[in-house]
Image (cartoon, rainbow, N blue to C red):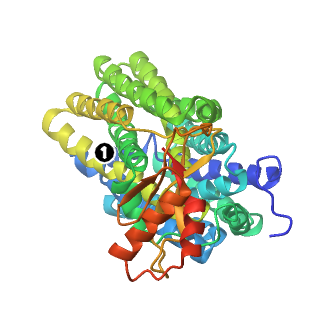
Amino acid sequence: MSGVRLGLRANAAQFGLLVGLNALVGAMVGLERSVLPLVGKHDFHLASNAAVLAFVVAFGSAKALANLGAGALADRIGRKRLLVFGWLLALPVAPLLGFAPSWWLIVAANVLLGANQGLAWSMTVVMKIDLAGPERRGLALGLNESAGYLGVAATAFATGAIAASVAPRTVVWTGALAISLAGTAIALVFVRDTGGHVAHEQLAHGEREALPLRAAFAEATIRRPVLRACSQAGLVNNLNDALAWGLAPLYLAAHGEDATKIGIVAAVYPGVWGFLQLGTGWLSDHAGRKPLITFGMLVQAGALALLVAGGGAFAPSLAAAALLGTGTAFVYPTLIASVSDVVEPRDRASVVGVYRFWRDGGFVAGALLAGFAADALGSGPAIAIVAALTAASGLLVAITPWQPSAGTPLRLRRWLPSPTSSWPIRAHGIRSPVYERPSEGGAMRAIECPCGHHLEGADDEELFRLARAHVDTDHPEMQRTDEQLRARVAADAYEV
């Protein structure tokens, strides 16, 4: 662990390299943003919106599962190895996109692209969190997501502009080949693994193994209100992103807009999103996570409503794209920072992987909902449905109890069962306000057993007696000495 330091300044060179690499990850998927739905309609003569959007379903499914696998394997295999493997999966995408004789091979290429995005983007996210440490996590994630989505915007605009004079498939596959070769080379030669930074940060919490995937999945999906709220908001965020990717170009084309204007709209959305994340990640470190997420989701809903109200005209569509990018900039880095706030370093990769699984499952849900709703009701009503879901998601975040995120110490509230012992080995860290101990009486002390039993006492001595009685009565298999119980109470009790 000698020589390992946390922080953006201490790790500036490696952090900057990962920022640049994530721009390439984003550029890879941005190639498809403005032209691939049009390729499905014009080159392969697909009549159904649902069939066109099948490539988004394939992409989202593969990316979601890759996120889940990346989170579970990051500590076991290593961050860099997964990053390199993700880029290797991108290499066959270019020839498949360029020479596929049927639309379903295009869909298959997007399975590989989704796996590339899941592994490569997940690892750049987690590695930047590892390097930054807890103090400037929002800023680090803002920089990461900004680079990625500015990369999306750049290639979305370029493909839309060039496709006016060059065959769209040619633009996509040649760009994909150049980007995938560059990304693979950089990941293989220049990136260093950040496992040592994780171990260094974990020392403050006590050394232990990471949560198993099943436990991490339950924590992020059901048990923890903040993680549950983040997972659903991430899913709905990418549900409307799938609509912007797959249905919006068709909606504009149906109202007479050409490839260049569609490319501009397709680029403005991730461009505004990427640029504003330079500030919104930093802002969430100071203003708190929850207000930014709620505000961003409601702005997204308003943007989609404006897109419908504009009837596919260029000017209101451009304004809607800018608003959608603004809302997403407030939401995207803040959600990942919120997830990272409430987990220990050892659990970070697995829990962030579960969150990203649900978030990118939104691509699947969005493509299916938008495709079938557009076929049945028309594009306008389909977009309106997604706008309503987005607003509801923001309101759900607003009513979720939230722990303050930045600048506050950790309060230890909930033990996790040890996989190798009958007694919990660590408490779960969550953020809480700074506590001033009362001079006399006042606050009680509390601790929780993993069985769900909550214990409160006037002081640690009373809490020890209650814990001793609870263990002896309800958990006789836990053979713990008084000294061990006293140590655990001293370490993990908190004020109420």
Find disc 1 in the rendering and name its residue: 366
Question: How many dots with numbers?
Answer: 1
Q: Secondary structure at mark 1?
A: helix
Outermost residue toward the left in this view: 376
Please name the residue shown 66% across and 65% down the image: 184
Q: Is residue 129 left or right of residue 152?
A: right
Where on the picture, by quarter, is residue 321?
top left
Residue 254, by quadrant, is top left
Mark 1: which amino acid?
Gly
Above/below status of 491 relative to 374? below
Residue 73 as seen in the image, left or right of residue 186 = left
Q: Is residue 54 above or below residue 299?
A: below
In the picture provided, is 167 more to the left or to the right than 82? Answer: left
Looking at the image, residue 127 lies above or below residue 151: below
Query: Quick check: can you spot residue 84?
Result: yes
**Foreground residue, 486 or 321?**
486
Measured as percent of width and height from the top left, residue 110 is found at: 42, 59
Residue at the (65%, 38%) spot, across then down: 407
Q: Position of residue 84 (x, y in %)?
A: 63, 69
Q: Quadrant of the N terminus?
A: bottom right
Q: Position of residue 8 (x, y in %)?
A: 77, 47
* Residue that appears at 70% across and 52% down: 133
